[in-house]
Structures are given as C-alpha cells and as structure tokens.
C-alpha cells in the first residue's frame, strides 16, 4: 500500500503597515533604505529574523523588493530605482502572494511646474495660487514652500530675505500657496516689483526649487461702482452690467485681456453660485477703433445672474481672477420665480 501524504498549512496574523520612513526620495537615487513600521511583522516559521517581500506600486506593474524583518513592528527594505516622479503604494507580504492594502505610500520627487493659476494676483497679498505639475510629494508642511523671483533679474527680496511662502501639498500634481503683499516684494536694488512679471517656483524638500519660469502679475484693486439692477426672478438668467473703474493708469489692459478671469459670485444663505463675466465698453460695440482713433478702454463688467432654487435677499460679488472677491459687494435679491411662456414662431 502506498504511504499517504500529509500536508500542513500555516496560518499567521496579517501584517499591518502604518508608515514608512523616510517616505520620499529623489528620482534615480541609488542605495536608499527605508524602515516600514506597523504590526504583526512576525516570521511565519517562528524565527526572530526572516525575509519578507515589499511591493512598491500596484499588483500589475509594481516592483517587489526583498525586505528584512527587524522586529514585530519594523521591516527594513531597499528602495527600488525608479525613473520618474510618482507616489506609489507600499505593501508587505510574508508569502509573496497576499499583500497588505493599508494606503501607505512612498514618493519619488522631481518637482516640475506646468502652470500656476490665477495669473493676476492682488497687490494686498493673500491670493491663493494653485500650482499644477508633477513630481510633488507630501514631505511635510515645513518642507513645501514656494519662492517668487524674476526671470530677467533673478532673486527678489522680501524684508531683506528671499521671497518664500509656505505651500500645501494637495496631491502629486497639485500644491497651493499664497502670494505675498506687493509692498514687500522688491528687486535687490530696493525697487518695488510693481506690475512686472514675477516667477513662481516650488520646493518639496530642502529648498531645491524648480526652474520653470511660470509668471504671475500683481494688479491694482478694481472699483465696482454700481450694477444696472439689484433683483431678478430666481429662475431666470439676466445680463448684469457693472460700472467698473479698472484703474487703467496702473493696470495693464493687455495683461487683463490675456489673463483676467472675471466671475460673479451670488450668495443667498449657505448657497453660492458663480457665473463667468467679461470686460465691456459702453455703449456696447464702442470698443472698436474707427477712423484711426484710439479705441476706448473697457469700463464695465457684464455677467449673467445666477439661477437659484431659493429666493430672498443675498449678495453679489465680483472677482477679476476668479479667486479674490474684494470689496463689500452689492445687495442682490432673488425674487419669486416668474412664469415663462414661449411664443413660436
């Protein structure tokens, strides 16, 4: 009679990954090690130290590295060589089949800026700038910073120091920061930046700043003087004409035509609706030059009212960059919905 074979199956507590330190590093660096901390890092054979596997990336395309169990709460692993900036999940397995899924990540940074918005910022400072790019990692609130400079003249000075502002990591493609007050931003000879172009760079670690030369511009505060009406039926969109002083003696018309993002924000209770606006010259059509004359500059903003599901007295505010709503705004009433009838033809 043949001898009957017996098999054993070993159960162990599922490992839990809580953190990796360091949690980020530059692209293409070699011989980097990190320590993973967590729970249940126990060798299935009962040994004190054993091999495990660490996957950087997803199941299909991830890179699996051999790790060393240091204790029940620590694993040491070599960081794989990676050729592009990215943020990858870090997962652990003791059988090379079943990996954790604890949402811990490792970031390969090589920051590069593609765009900054808005391009027009308030001279009072505080404009929230959204920096888009790649190679961003969450290296900690003290490490993520932006710096303002000049493409033509290099470093700018703010109160005798480089013009640096704190940044905030949003995701691997987005960092936000705030513009500094124009009054503090100067060239090295002490001349104020005025409305000259100003570059925005970012660093995610140890003040290693990008060099992408994406520029923004300070603008002087616009005065919104009056609106042609202060109420509309809540269910209708009606063009609103806002008498505006653009202060063209200080602001650059070409910069406004190229970069302005006029919006009207309507607020009633806890509901807000934003509509897009544009610059206009009154009477409409008079902005075109005729017979060699200089065309008059825009002197109004036109934007449609918002459709609201509630009615009552709210507020209208206007922004030149889609971010900063300066001034006190205008009281604005949304009246009971009107009945709409169509006549055709």
Image (cartoon, rainbow, N blue to C red):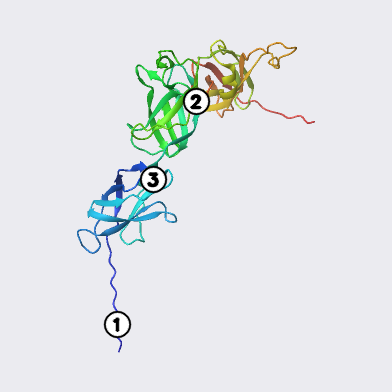
Query: Which of the pair 210/170 is nearer the observer?
Result: 210
Give above or below for 228 relative to 2.
Answer: above
Q: Earlier in the sequence, mark 3 or mark 1?
A: 1
Mark 3: few, some, or many residues within 10 Å (few <14, many ≥20)? some
Give above or below for 117 relative to 101.
Answer: above
What is the number of the mark on residue 4? 1
Residue 185 position by quadrant: top left
What secondary structure is marked by label 1?
Answer: loop
Q: Quadrant of the C terminus?
A: top right
Q: Is residue 179 left or right of residue 312?
A: left
Q: Mark 3 — residue?
A: 28
Mark 1: few, some, or many residues within 10 Å (few <14, many ≥20)? few
Residue 291 is situated, as x and y percent measured from the top left of the image, at 75, 12
What is the number of the mark on residue 215? 2
Q: Quadrant of the N terminus?
A: bottom left
Q: CA distance from mark 3 to mark 1?
A: 54 Å
> Mark 3–mark 1 contact, CB under 8 Å?
no
Q: Residue at x 48, y 15 (%)?
A: 194
Give above or below for 195 relative to 49.
Answer: above
């Amino acid at each position: 009679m043949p001898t009957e074979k017996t098999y054993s199956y070993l159960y162990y507590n599922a490992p839990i990954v809580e953190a990796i330190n360091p949690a980020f590093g530059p692209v293409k660096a070699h011989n980097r090690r990190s320590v993973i901390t967590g729970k249940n890092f126990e060798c299935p054979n009962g040994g004190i130290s054993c091999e495990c596997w660490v996957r950087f990336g997803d199941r299909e395309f991830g890179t699996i590295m051999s790790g060393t169990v240091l204790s029940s709460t620590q694993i040491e692993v070599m960081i794989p060589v990676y050729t592009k900036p990215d943020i990858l999940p870090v997962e652990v397995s003791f059988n090379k089949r079943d990996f954790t899924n604890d949402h811990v990540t490792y970031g390969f940074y090589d920051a590069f800026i593609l765009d900054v918005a808005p391009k027009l910022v308030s001279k009072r400072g505080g404009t929230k700038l959204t920096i888009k790019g790649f190679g961003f990692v969450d290296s900690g609130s003290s490490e993520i910073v932006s710096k303002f400079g000049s493409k033509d003249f290099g470093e700018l000075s703010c109160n005798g120091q480089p013009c640096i502002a704190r940044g905030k990591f949003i995701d691997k493609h987005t960092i936000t920061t705030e513009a500094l007050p124009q009054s503090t931003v100067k060239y090295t000879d002490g001349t104020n930046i005025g409305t000259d172009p100003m570059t925005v760079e970012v660093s995610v670690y140890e003040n290693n700043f990008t060099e992408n030369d994406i520029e923004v511009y300070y603008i002087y505060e616009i005065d919104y003087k009056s609106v042609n009406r202060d109420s509309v039926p809540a269910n209708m969109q009606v063009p609103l004409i806002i008498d505006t002083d653009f202060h063209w003696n200080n602001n650059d018309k070409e910069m406004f035509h190229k970069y302005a993002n006029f919006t009207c924000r309507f607020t009633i209770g806890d509901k807000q609706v934003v509509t897009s606006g544009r610059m206009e010259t009154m009477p409409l059509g008079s902005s075109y030059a005729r017979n060699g004359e200089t065309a008059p500059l825009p002197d109004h903003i036109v934007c449609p009212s918002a459709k609201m599901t509630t009615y009552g007295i709210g507020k209208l505010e206007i922004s030149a960059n889609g971010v900063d709503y300066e001034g006190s705004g205008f009281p604005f009433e949304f009246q009971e919905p009107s009945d709409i009838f169509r006549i055709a033809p």
